[in-house]
Image (tube, rainbow, N blue to C red):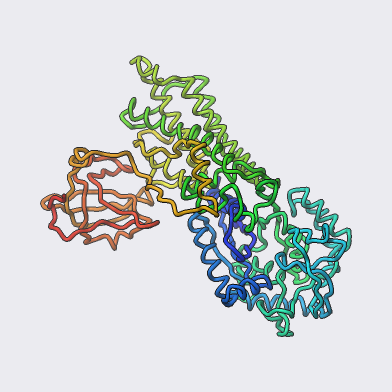
């Protein structure tokens, strides 16, 4: 629970930009993002790396077919990948591209280090090559004459090449797996890799001379460095190794390389062997997750284009929101195992867990506090067995979530949270506050029920933050906690909500008509997709009479400072004609006090005063959302003048 727990370095694979990404890539990145957010919330100094692997024959061939340079081809695809991660609010700290100069020069230095250690030599390769996988295979390794990884045909290849002495490290790799079984998980992957090594390791081809879209071999520029030495080293070149090692010294070795099961071999055999040769520490753990399956087959870029189910994450986000998609991916599937993806399974999970359970709990609770307690969370002064059970479930949830996250069991971590969600819903049925409200002598018990529900939801808002941070913020806003961040240590304690003012907002997760949604999604399959005109999500409609009650006045900010007890709040002195008022706004992350002084602003002047962290706020300033940033609404009118 204490802050400053040390560093935590997590990576995704660097994705191959041959086409747009699909929900399968999203699955891996969402897992890494959830873990990075969780570790930050728990007090770790996190470094989260993702990126793109941009060299190789396949890219060169695709670019030639399109009539552009390989660099122009990957630039366009990478722009799309970055936009997707921005849309999904992926919180990476660095995005590495293997075409970047920082990576290129460092790969060449790592090549030379291994070369000078005697582990790289020139020879000739003759074998079978899979272009999509950038992999060489022997006849015995093929499955039905095709690549064992992707199932596509292979071609005979013969060329001069440089080799890495992978065979030299077979015994050390077996010792690594035996003495450190946690290095590669799940256990099934480790058993596969142990068996692979025992069959005998061939030295690894690490250069090509039949195409030139790659990093030149520093000792022989007729060759380019082959994909796995180029790609795998990104995990340390992005940290500045070897020439600017500040981040490397801070974060390496990586805590976790999170990868799909199809590239476990490269990360758990080839990468450790290269690090051993270079005399560098090994990553602490490689985790191989399963595949999302469509019709029994792995989701792929080609299959995504033909799928009966919509697998474009942008389409799904547009319809259901970022957090709903993230929740489904993390909740539905068991880490390490394959899982079947269908739109129907996704929609049912969203309806049952998000709309029925979580959304309904928040909506009911806020409505009852507004109805029975004038919107103010009351103090708890009574306690019975139902109260005690809810309190124990709530304060015990965080440690259970931690235990599951330590195992990368995202679905079970979310299940621990939903045990609390369901317990809070059951508590409402047990205590029947609508009945308590009819008896004045039960007011204290009613207040306790409202208090306990508010506390349970406060804790839930903290627990879900790594998985659904936007939803967490919306819940905290409705619970009156908009002015303070979720803190992990606060999930272990009860009774922090006395006096907070709740305010009901729009439904967090509206209930879906599944049959209708499936019909709409069918229209959005790639072959029939048309741009959708999706209405904005708005608060409930108001009439002109409602709007006419608002008194808007022009004011000038004459003083501004940070709130002494809340990092998100700024305290303004606003002059409106003959009157100067104190107004507090939660905008400190968007503006500095100094830049606000002198601005002519629009004030909601007849808003009921309220206390914010011990200071009174009389009114509200108007701001407008501009993407992820707020803009202050300003005017040239005279102070005190009525607006509208």
Q: Residue at x 64, y 58 (%)?
A: 302
Q: Is residue 431 left or right of residue 556?
A: right
Q: x and y percent of residue 340 in the render?
A: 66, 44
Q: How many marks?
A: 0
Pick the residue in front: 583 or 158: 158
From what the image shows, is residue 320 above or below residue 234? Answer: above
Residue 260 placement: quadrant: bottom right
Examine the rendered structure and indicate whether residue 138 appears above or below residue 409.
Answer: below
For the point 53% across and 34% down, the residue is 352
Instruction: Farthest residue to the front: give it.
Output: 528
Considering every residue shown, the one lying at the far left of the view is 578
Task: Tell me, yes or no, if residue 127 can be seen here.
Answer: yes
Residue 355 in percent (x, y) is at: 48, 35
Which residue occupies the foreground of this view, 462 or 541? Answer: 541
**Could you say which quadrant of the image residue 558 lies in?**
bottom left
| The N terminus sits in image quarter | top right
- Kindly identify the residue that appears in the image at 34 percent across and 25 percent down: 372
Indicate the position of residue 10 as horizontal and vertical percent values: 62, 57
The answer to whether residue 273 is left or right of residue 97 is: right
**Which of the two residues, 312 or 491, is positioned nearer the viewer here?**
312
Residue 276 appears anywhere in the view: no
Q: Position of residue 427 (x, y in %)?
A: 49, 24
């Amino acid at each position: 629970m204490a802050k400053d727990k040390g560093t935590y370095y997590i990576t995704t694979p660097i994705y191959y930009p041959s086409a747009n990404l699909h929900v399968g890539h999203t699955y891996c990145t969402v897992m890494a993002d959830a873990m990075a957010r969780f570790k930050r919330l728990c007090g770790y100094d996190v470094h989260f790396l993702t990126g793109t692997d941009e060299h190789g024959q396949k890219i060169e061939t695709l670019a030639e077919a399109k009539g552009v340079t390989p660099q122009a081809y990957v630039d366009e695809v990478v722009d799309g990948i970055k936009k997707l991660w921005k849309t999904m609010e992926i919180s990476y700290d660095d995005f590495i591209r293997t075409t970047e100069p920082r990576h290129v020069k460092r790969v060449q230095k790592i090549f030379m280090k291994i070369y000078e250690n005697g582990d790289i030599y020139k020879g000739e390769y003759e074998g079978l090559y899979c272009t999509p996988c950038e992999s060489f295979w022997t006849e015995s390794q093929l499955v039905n004459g095709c690549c064992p990884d992707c199932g596509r045909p292979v071609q005979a290849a013969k060329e001069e090449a440089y080799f890495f002495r992978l065979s030299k490290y077979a015994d050390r790799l077996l010792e690594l797996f035996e003495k450190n079984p946690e290095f590669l998980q799940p256990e099934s992957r480790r058993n596969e890799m142990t068996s692979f090594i025992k069959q005998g390791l061939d030295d690894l081809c690490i250069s090509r001379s039949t195409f030139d879209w790659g990093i030149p071999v520093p000792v022989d520029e007729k060759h380019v460095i082959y994909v796995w030495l180029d790609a795998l080293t990104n995990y340390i070149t992005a940290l500045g190794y070897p020439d600017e090692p500040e981040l490397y010294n801070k974060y390496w070795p990586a805590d976790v390389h999170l990868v799909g099961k199809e590239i476990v071999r490269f990360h758990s055999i080839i990468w450790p062997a290269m690090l051993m040769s270079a005399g560098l520490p090994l990553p602490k753990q490689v985790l191989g997750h399963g595949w999302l399956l469509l019709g029994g087959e792995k989701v792929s870029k080609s299959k995504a284009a033909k799928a009966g189910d919509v697998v474009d994450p942008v389409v799904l986000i547009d319809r259901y929101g970022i957090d709903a998609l993230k929740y489904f991916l993390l909740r539905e599937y068991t880490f390490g195992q394959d899982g079947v993806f269908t739109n129907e399974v996704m929609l049912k999970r969203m309806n049952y867990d998000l709309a029925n359970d979580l959304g309904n709990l928040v909506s009911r609770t806020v409505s009852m506090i507004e109805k029975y307690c004038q919107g103010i969370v009351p103090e708890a002064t009574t306690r019975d067995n139902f109260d005690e059970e809810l309190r124990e479930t709530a304060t015990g949830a965080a440690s259970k979530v931690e235990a599951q996250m330590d195992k990368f069991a995202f679905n079970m971590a979310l299940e621990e949270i939903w045990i609390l969600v369901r317990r809070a819903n059951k508590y409402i049925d047990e205590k029947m506050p609508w009945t308590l409200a009819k008896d004045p002598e039960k007011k204290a018990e009613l207040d306790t029920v409202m208090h306990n529900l508010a506390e349970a939801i406060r804790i839930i808002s903290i627990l879900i933050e790594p998985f659904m941070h936007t939803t967490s913020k919306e819940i905290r806003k409705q619970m009156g906690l908009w002015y303070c961040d979720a803190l992990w240590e606060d999930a272990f304690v009860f009774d922090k909500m006395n006096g907070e003012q709740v305010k009901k907002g729009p439904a967090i997760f509206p209930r879906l008509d599944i049959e209708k949604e499936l019909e709409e999604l069918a229209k959005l399959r790639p072959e029939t997709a048309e741009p959708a005109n999706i209405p904005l999500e708005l608060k409930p409609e108001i009439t002109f009479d409602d709007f006419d009650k608002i008194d808007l006045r022009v004011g000038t900010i004459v003083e501004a400072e940070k709130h002494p007890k809340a990092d998100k709040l700024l305290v303004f002195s606003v002059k409106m004609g003959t009157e100067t008022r104190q107004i507090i706004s939660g905008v400190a992350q968007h503006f500095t006090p100094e830049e606000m002084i002198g601005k002519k602003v629009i004030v909601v002047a007849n808003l009921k005063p309220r206390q914010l962290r011990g200071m009174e706020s009389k009114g509200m300033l108007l701001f407008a959302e501009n993407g992820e940033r707020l803009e202050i609404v300003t005017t040239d009118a005279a102070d005190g003048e009525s607006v509208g």
